[in-house]
Structure formats: C-alpha cells, structure tokens
C-alpha cells in the first residue's frame, strides 16, 4: 500500500468515527432544541459558542492547526443551529392569503428541488447582478426551467418587464399548474411575484432571496408591485409565496455596501421591536451572525404580517424609515441603494437619543449618516407615497429602541416637522 493509500485509509477511518460521533452529537442537539422550545430560548448563544471553540482548540497537541480547527468547529455549530431551526419548525406564516414555510438554512439552495415542487414548467426570474451559479443551481433541479434575466436595479421593476415576463410564459406554454421562482433581491421578488399574481389569475410563487435586504424583509409578506411614473410601488397586489428558501451562504458574494444596505432593514425591525437584536448589531456590527439577524428580523415581520396582512393597521410599522426614505430614493435616482435610503429615512423619525444610537451604528456599518437633500427636494415623492391619505400623513415614530407609536399630521405640518429634523 502506498503512502497515499495509507493516508486515505486513515482519513476513511476517521470519517467513519466522525459519522458516528456526528449522529451522537446531533441527538444531543435535538434535546437542546426541545429544551429551547419549552423555554423560549434563542437558538444562537454566541458567548457559549466562542467559549466552546476556545476550550476545544486548547486540546490540540499541534497549535499550528488551531485556525483550521476553529473553522471546523464553527461549521459544526452552524450545522447544529440549522438543525435546531429545522426541528423548531423553521418559520411558518399563516394569514388570509395562505400558509407557507420559510426555510432558513445554509446550503438549502442546492436542495431547492427537495423543498419546492419544481417538477413542472418553472419561470426563473433573476437579474444581471445575481451570480449565475445561483440560477444554474436552481435550474438544474427543475423539470422544465425557463430563465428570464432583467437588468439589475430598481428601473427594471416596470410594466415593460412585467409584460415581457408574462409573454415568455405564454410563449412557453405555461399554465396555472406551473410556477414562478424569484432568484434575486427585492426588485426581482417584487416583479416576479406580481407576474405570478397576475398570469392566468395566479400561479404558484416561490421566493429565493439572495441579498440580505430581501432575506430580512421583502422575502415574506406578500406585497408585490411595479413602479410607475417615477413613483415606487403604486401598482401591485398581495401574493403570498408558496415557500421561501433563505440560504445565508449566498451572502458571501455581496459587496460590503450591499450587505450594509441590507442591515438597514434589520435595524428597522430592531428599532421598532427588538432591543436585543439592536444591541447585538451595536456590539457586532457587520460581524453579527447572519442567521441570528435574519431569524430575529423575520420573526418580527411574520408576527406583523399575520396580524395585519394588507396594511390596515399594525403593518404600517414596517414603513419606519420608508415614508421619508422613498422620497430620498426617488430624488437620489439610483445613486443611493434602497437600504441606504431607508437608513436615512429613519433619522428624522425618532427621538434624539435613538438618533444618536442609529448614527453610531451607521458609522460602524458604513451606512450614510447625512440626508443629502432638503425637505423641498424630496417632498414631491413623499406626497406621492401611499402613506398619504386624505391630506394627512401617518408615520412611525420611535421614542426608544424596541417600541414605536403611530402619529398623524396634516401634510404641511409634517413638512414643517421634516424641515426641523433635517435642518433645511
């Protein structure tokens, strides 16, 4: 037997032993999940994980392997967390528009065919900014995939592309028994969802968000739309997905700016509902565990959507940062990302103590901290926004992290408030 064969035999023996130990470890993880279900404890205990890694690394006889062993331990713990999430039922949404599961698990993209019914015609909608390997991975698991790619950016969310996608479905013989799958960020999800809501009066829609922003926010809730005449989302529908797959591994291809912009939506959720998540973001910034951030943000949105599916009351809290942010986004004309506009839009809508914490967090994440436009420059878009009703504007105000109130002012009084908060 050659040296190579001997080494491989040792590896094979180790793998057999590790397989048995892995099953034993996961049996214990199952007991931990049961305990957490009963007590309401969160899946992630970052302090314990760091302690375990440090303690176990100290057992090595070869300190040169410490970095590789720490990486190995982190991978095992990530698998354990994913298993716990699965045992705890992942995230289930039940509302008037339907029931569906959100599967949050690293590597789930490669198993999309096991989670979704893709044994039919599948329109895969994506944009030019999404890595092609993600689309190819999903397409390989479809019986009859038809890939449609639109240009990256908000400008693609229009009636022209809506008509184009519906035409592709007609040309390829799609029926009500087929489905639409979005593989991309919020623009792709909104556009693909609106197509799915409209074609043949509705076909199944699956969402596979590939940006942090869409994973923590727009992937669920059922609001789908297109832009028109310079106004964001004035025409759309409520179309709940049949299932959502969230794979944190895809975030590795995002730029720092894209990741930070996605964090803005998580900050929005934390500022209005979850002081623990906000404190985690303050402490860890962009290094906060993605699974924990996504999970906590989605649980907030799920609770809101289940109570108020069609924005008749509570769901308006999700507009924190958007009432002003949409005006900023319209005026920025593509120079600022959606999440950056939402981040800026939160600043005038909170107490000074909250604003100070937001600004410190933005600095840590690399988000913009100064609104580059005057109130008059963004006012036209604010007036067009759908939060305007009967001449009054209802907005979300945060006095302290973790809570919020709804306030309503006549439009001109709100304009005066904005001038005072923005400074011009």
Image: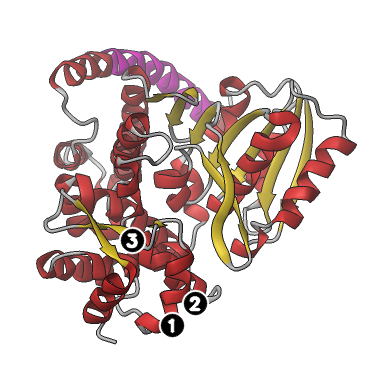
Badge 3: residue crowd in 10 Å (few <14, some 14–19, many ≥20): many
Residue 110's tag is none
Q: Nearer the viewer, residue 346 or 78?
A: 346
Instruction: Pick the quarter of the image with the C terminus.
Output: bottom left
Q: CA distance from mark 3 to mark 1?
A: 18 Å
Position of residue 307 measured from the top left corner of the image (x, y, whole percent)? 32, 30
Q: Which residue is mark 3?
A: 393
Query: In which quarter of the view is residue 373 placed?
Result: bottom left
Q: Is residue 372 visible?
A: no
Q: Which residue is mark 1?
A: 377
User: Which of the two discs, 1 and 2, sits closer to the camera?
Assistant: 1
Query: Which segment is the magenta one?
Result: 6-27
Determine the main secondary structure of the stretch shown in magenta: helix
Q: CA distance from mark 3 to mark 2?
A: 19 Å
Pointer 3 or 1: first along the chain: 1
Position of residue 164 measured from the top left corner of the image (x, y, whole percent)? 80, 50
| 278 relative to 204, above or below | below
| 229 relative to 202, above or below | below
Q: Secondary structure at mark 1?
A: helix
Q: Which residue is mark 2?
A: 331
Name the residue at 34% across, 42% down: 315
């Amino acid at each position: 037997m050659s040296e190579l064969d001997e080494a491989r035999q040792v590896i094979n023996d180790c793998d057999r032993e590790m397989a048995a130990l892995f099953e034993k470890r996961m049996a214990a993880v199952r007991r931990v999940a049961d305990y957490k279900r009963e007590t309401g404890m969160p899946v992630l205990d970052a302090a314990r994980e760091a302690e375990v890694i440090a303690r176990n690394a100290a057992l090595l006889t070869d300190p040169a392997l410490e970095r590789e062993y720490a990486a190995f331990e982190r991978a095992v713990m990530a698998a354990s967390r994913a298993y716990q999430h699965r045992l705890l039922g992942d995230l289930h949404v039940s509302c008037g528009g339907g029931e569906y599961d959100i599967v949050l698990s690293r590597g789930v993209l490669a198993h999309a065919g096991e989670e979704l019914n893709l044994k039919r015609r599948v329109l895969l909608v994506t944009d030019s900014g999404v890595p092609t390997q993600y689309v190819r991975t999903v397409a390989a698991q479809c019986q009859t995939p038809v890939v449609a790619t639109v240009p990256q950016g908000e400008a693609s969310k229009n009636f022209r592309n809506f008509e184009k996608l519906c035409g592709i479905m007609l040309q390829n013989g799609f029926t009500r028994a087929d489905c639409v799958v979005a593989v991309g960020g919020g623009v792709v999800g909104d556009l693909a969802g609106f197509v799915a809501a409209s074609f043949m009066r509705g076909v199944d829609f699956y969402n596979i968000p590939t940006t942090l922003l869409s994973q923590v926010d727009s992937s669920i809730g059922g609001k789908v739309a297109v832009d028109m005449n310079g106004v964001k989302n004035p025409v759309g529908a409520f179309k709940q997905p049949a299932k959502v797959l969230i794979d944190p591994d895809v975030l590795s291809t995002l730029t720092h700016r894209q990741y930070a912009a996605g964090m803005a939506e998580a900050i929005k959720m934390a500022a209005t509902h979850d002081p623990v998540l906000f404190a985690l973001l303050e402490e860890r910034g962009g290094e906060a565990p993605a699974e924990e951030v996504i999970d906590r943000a989605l649980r907030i949105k799920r609770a809101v959507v289940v109570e108020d599916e069609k924005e008749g009351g509570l769901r308006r809290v999700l507009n924190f940062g958007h009432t002003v942010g949409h005006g900023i986004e319209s005026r920025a004309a593509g120079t600022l990302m959606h999440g950056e506009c939402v981040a800026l839009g939160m600043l005038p809508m909170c107490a000074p103590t909250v604003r100070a914490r937001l600004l410190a967090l933005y600095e840590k994440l690399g988000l913009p901290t100064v609104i580059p436009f005057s109130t008059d420059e963004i006012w036209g878009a604010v007036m067009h926004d759908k939060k305007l009703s009967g001449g009054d504007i209802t907005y979300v105000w945060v006095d302290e992290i973790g809570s919020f109130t709804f306030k309503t002012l006549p439009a001109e009084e709100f304009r005066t408030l904005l001038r005072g908060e923005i400074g011009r």
